[in-house]
Amino acid sequence: MSAEQEKITSSKSGVRPVMPNLSIRPMELKDLDAVVALEQEVFPDPWSKDSFQHELSGNECSSLFVALDGERVIGYSVHWCFDIEAHISNFAVDNNYRRQFIGSFLLGYIISDILRKKIYKIYLEVRSANEAAKNLYLRHGFEIDGTRPGYYIKDKDDAILMSLTLKEGL
Ligand SMILES: CC(C)(COP(=O)(O)OP(=O)(O)OC[C@H]1O[C@@H](n2cnc3c(N)ncnc32)[C@H](O)[C@@H]1OP(=O)(O)O)[C@@H](O)C(=O)NCCC(=O)NCCS
């Protein structure tokens, strides 16, 4: 792999390569079936296809991205940008592609998108038992702000509220 091909990202243990065919682009209608299939595999309370379609076409605050291995959708994200704050509302990586820094790469991409809009505060909620997501966000500088008991209606799981404060020029 040439140096140009090698996408790199930092980790506590140094610098690690990310898959050579990895790319990120805005989600399109043609991605919806693959995104919804992943969503149903990953979450106990998945968003419907209609919900994604609404975010894509009917919500001007919403930004949606897909991570691709070549043409294959292996991750996706949804975030909302308001005047002075952003909210990450959906985020997942295909189970077969985890622990390869895809989530970190996608999260970095989202943070850059939010910074470009001159927004410096990002909020999100994560299930209390979701150690993978909590660790991912903590590694990227998010802090835990508190807990919202019974936030997830279906199984009454608690939500951990997290936020990241960005600085201009990062
Ligand atoms: C959370 C998720 C997006 C992480 O994606 P990923 O591509 O595997 O994450 P990365 O490879 O970039 O991991 C970065 C860091 O996150 C943490 N992490 C990721 N998966 C972890 C796991 N299973 N257990 C503990 N920590 C984990 C680690 O600190 C990891 O760094 P390390 O590999 O050097 O230890 C993925 O597990 C996922 O899609 N989970 C289901 C959906 C979900 O929970 N979405 C978030 C909703 S808020």
Image (cartoon, rainbow, N blue to C red):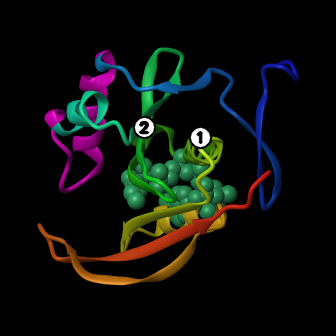
Label 2 crowd (10 A; few <14 / some 14-19 / many >=20)? some
- Hey, what amino acid is under mark 1? Asp
95 and 157: which is toward the camera: 157
Q: Quadrant of residue 155?
A: bottom left
SS class of the residue under badge 2? strand
- Residue 141 in the image: state x and y as whole percent: 66, 66
Residue 42 lies in the magenta-colored region = yes
User: Does the residue at mark 1 contact the one at mark 2 (Cβ under 8 Å)?
Assistant: yes
- Residue 44 in the image: state x and y as whole percent: 20, 56
Q: Upstream in the sequence, badge 1 or badge 2?
A: 2
Q: Main secondary structure of the magenta part?
A: helix
Residue 6 lies in the magenta-colored region = no
Look at the image and give the residue range highlighted in magenta.
30-50
| Residue where numbered disc 1 is placed | 113
| Residue where numbered disc 2 is placed | 63
Is the residue indicated by label 1 positioned so its CB lies within 8 Å of ligand 1? no
Q: Quadrant of residue 19?
A: top right
> Seen in the image, is 46 located left or right of residue 63?
left
Q: Quadrant of the N terminus?
A: top right
Is the residue indicated by label 2 positioned so its CB lies within 8 Å of ligand 1? no
- Residue 127 in the image: state x and y as whole percent: 34, 70
Q: Which mark is residue 7?
A: none
